[in-house]
Image (cartoon, grey):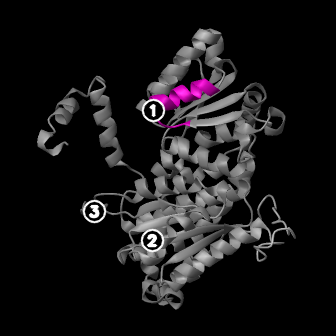
Amino acid sequence: MNLRLDYNNMMSEAVGSEGLDESVFAENAAFIEKAYKTVMDGRGKGWQEWCDLPYVGNDYLDEMISYCDGIRRKAESFVVFGIGGSALGPIAVLQALMHLHHNELPREKRNAPKFYVEDNVDPERMAALLDVIDIKSTYFNVITKSGETSETLSQFLIVYDLLKKALGKDEAKNRIVVTTTDGKGTLYNLAKEEGFKLYAVQPGVGGRFSVLCPVGLVPFAVMGIDIKAMLKGAAQMSDAAAVADVRKNPALISAFMQYEEMQRGKNVSVLMPYADSLKYMADFYCQIWAESLGKAVDLDGKTVNAGQTPAKSLGVTDQHSQVQLYTEGPFDKVVTFIGVDKFRSTQVIADDKDVDACDFLKGHTMNELINCERKATEYALRKAKRCNFTIYLPEVNAETIGELLMYFMYETAFAGAMLNIDTFNQPGVEEGKKATFAMLGRKGYEQKLKEVEAAVKYDKYTI
C-alpha cells in the first residue's frame, strides 16, 4: 500500500476536547467490528459489486485497451456525456493523470485526443462544445448507469443527429461508445438497435462507485492511462480495507473518526488536496460522501436525517478564501488534507540578485513552498483546536490514484455501516428524476405530473 494516513490532529493530545482520546478505539471495538463485518460480508454481493472491480481479467482489459487505442490514434477529440458518477470520476482521474493543459498542447505532445466531459444540459455549454470540436473527427462516449438519464440522452440525441448528417449513418454509429447496464434501459436498447460499441456496467455497481468499471476505464484507456496499474492500486487498497485491525486499516479508521465527530456535531467534511492535479478529486469525494450518507431513515426505519455535508477546497488557493472560516468559525468541521511527497516536476524559485526582496524564497522550490504551506495550515488548524488529518500519496500516478479512489469507496461504505443506513440507494435523487420525466411528458408519469402541478406557489412570496 502506497497511501499513508496521519491522524495526529484528530486526537485529543493535539486538539484537546474537540479530538478523540486514544481509548475510543478500544471502547468502540465491538461497534467498529460490526461495521467492518457488514461491509466485508457484502463484498461482491448486491450493490457491493464495486468491491470486485480491481480483479477484472486481463483478457477483458486487453480487448478494451486495443479498442480504445484505435480511438486514440484516430480521434482529434473525445467527448464524454455523463452526469454524477459518470462524469465526476473521469474528470477527477484525468485531471490527476494528464497534463494540466492537455487540450492546449499540440497533437504530437498530447499523444491523445483533446478531452471533454459534458455533464450539464445548459444549452450554452452544448453550443460552446460544438464550436470547438470538429464533429467529423470526434468520438463520443455516452455513459448512463440506468440508461434513462435525461441529461445524457438529450446530449446523445443532439450529437447523433449531427454525426449522421455529417458522416452518414454507417460511419456515425462507429463514433459512439455506449457504457450502460447490460440488458436493460433505453440506452442499452438503442445501442443494440443502432449497433454502437457497448461496454456493460455490472448491475450491482452504483454510479458513484463506478469509476473503476467501464464508466471510467474506457475514457482512461482512450487517453492512454495505464488502467492495469490503476486497478493494481485499487486492489492494494482493497486488501488494506480487509484488515480487521482498525489501527492498520486506513479506510476503516478514518470512517470511524468521521463518525465519532459527526456525533459531536462535526457536520461538515472538507477535502483539501494540496495539488492542482487532485483538484477534482474533491468533487468525486463530495458526491460519494453526500449521496451515500445523506439519508432520511436508517435500516430500522427510524428517521435519522443522517449525513455530513462535504465541502471542496484546494490548497494553497483556498487558504486565501476558506481557511479563515475553518480556523475561527464554528467547531463543525473535519478537514482532510491530501499531500503529495514527490511532484512530477520541480520548479526552482530564481535567486535573482537584481531583485532586492523576497530573500526567504530565493533558492527554494515551489515543491517546498506548497508542502510548507500545507504543513502550516495543518498547524494553524491544530493550534485552533480544529480536527484534521492528512492523506499522503508518494506521487500522483495511475497506481496511487486507483488506491485513493478505492480508499474513498471503502471509507464511505464503512461510514454508512456505522450510521446504519443504506449506503447505496439515493431516494432523494430519484424523486427529482421522476418529476423531470413528468414535466417533459414521459408516458407513465401522468399521476406524478398532477402531483407536481398541485404544489401551490403564492404570488405574494415572489418579488
**Range shown magenta:** 118-132
- The amino acid marked with disc number 1 is Val
Q: Give the structural element (helix, strand or loop) at label 1.
A: loop
Identify the mark nearer the N-term, 2 or 3: 3
Q: Residue 409, image x and y in percent?
A: 54, 58
Q: Does residue 111 appear to the left or right of 27 in the view shown? A: right
| Residue 300, label in figure | 3
Residue ID for mark 1: 121
State yes or no: discs 2 and 3 in contact (Cβ < 8 Å).
Answer: no
Q: Secondary structure at mark 2?
A: helix
Q: Quadrant of the C terminus?
A: top left
Calculate the distance from the C-alpha at mark 2 to the C-alpha at mark 3: 37 Å
Q: Which mark is residue 325?
A: 2
Residue 207 in sight in this render: yes
Taking the spot 70% from the left edge, 34% from the top edge, the residue there is 114
Front: mark 1 or 2? 2
* SS for callout 3: loop
Give the residue type that dot 3 points to: Asp
* Comparing labels 2 and 3, the label whose residue is closer to the camera: 2
Q: Earlier in the sequence, mark 1 or mark 2?
A: 1
